Image (cartoon, rainbow, N blue to C red):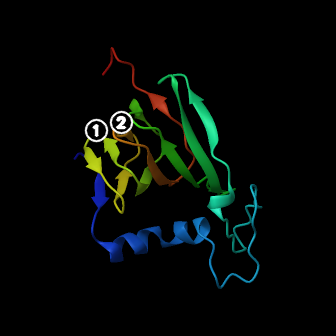
């Protein structure tokens, strides 16, 4: 699996890793000042609660694959550029070989995440190390929705077919 690691059926470990992300992504009943809406202020010194169910999916056409991916922006840290978003790949859409100048994780919420290292279902967290050549997307059977988290500024660099 070359540096790719995943958590499956280990709720305690997955919860410890994802808890900070889920606090941002899910409205909390104890939040005394929830901030609802499409563009909450990104003040890292204040609790942020976003009801992602009320956010519209943003369609992002990807010229490289000739299809659209969909996302809901949840949080970007203004100092580190760490970002958290929901991403939905339509059935059968695979982002071809690429790298990132950051590590990123995907927690599968619905569907099957297909990667260069295998397929992963709901409840699985998959971490892709910085610089690793990877492919990921949805199985042919249906869409996949993931909670997408980076460890610093995000960019995608496609690997040339001739170089690969």
Q: In this picture, is 76 found above or below 10?
A: above
Question: Which labelled disc corresponds to residue 116?
Answer: 1
Q: Measured from the top left, where is residue 131 in percent x and y?
A: 39, 40
Q: Measured from the top left, where is residue 77 in percent x and y?
A: 65, 58
Which residue, as the protein is rendered here, is positioned at the far left?
Answer: 1
Residue drawn at the location 49% of the way across and 72% of the way down: 19
Q: Measured from the top left, where is residue 102 in percent x and y?
A: 48, 46
First in residue order: circle 2 vs circle 1? 1
Residue drawn at the location 42% of the way across and 69% of the way down: 17
Is 68 situated left or right of 58 in this image? left
Q: Which residue is mark 2?
A: 135
Residue drawn at the location 43% of the way across and 43% of the way down: 143
Q: In this picture, is 112 found above or below 32?
A: above
Question: Based on the displayed image, in which of its 4 quarters is residue 137 positioned?
Answer: top left
* Element assignment for label 2: strand
Q: Measured from the top left, where is residue 42 in percent x and y?
A: 73, 61
């Amino acid at each position: 699996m070359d540096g790719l690691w995943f958590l499956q059926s280990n709720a305690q470990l997955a919860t410890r890793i994802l808890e900070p992300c889920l606090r941002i992504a899910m409205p909390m009943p104890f939040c005394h000042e929830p901030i609802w809406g499409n563009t909450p202020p990104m003040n890292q010194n204040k609790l942020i609660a976003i009801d992602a169910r009320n956010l519209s999916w943003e369609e992002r056409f990807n010229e490289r694959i000739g299809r659209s991916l969909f996302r809901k922006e949840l949080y970007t840290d203004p100092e580190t550029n760490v970002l958290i978003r929901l991403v939905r790949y339509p059935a059968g859409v695979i982002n071809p070989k690429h790298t990132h100048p950051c590590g990123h994780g995907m927690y599968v919420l619905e569907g099957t995440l297909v990667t260069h290292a295998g397929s992963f279902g709901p409840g699985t967290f998959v971490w892709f190390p910085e610089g690793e050549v990877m492919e990921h997307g949805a199985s042919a059977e249906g869409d996949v929705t993931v909670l997408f988290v980076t460890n610093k500024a995000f960019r995608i660099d496609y690997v040339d077919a001739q170089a690969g």
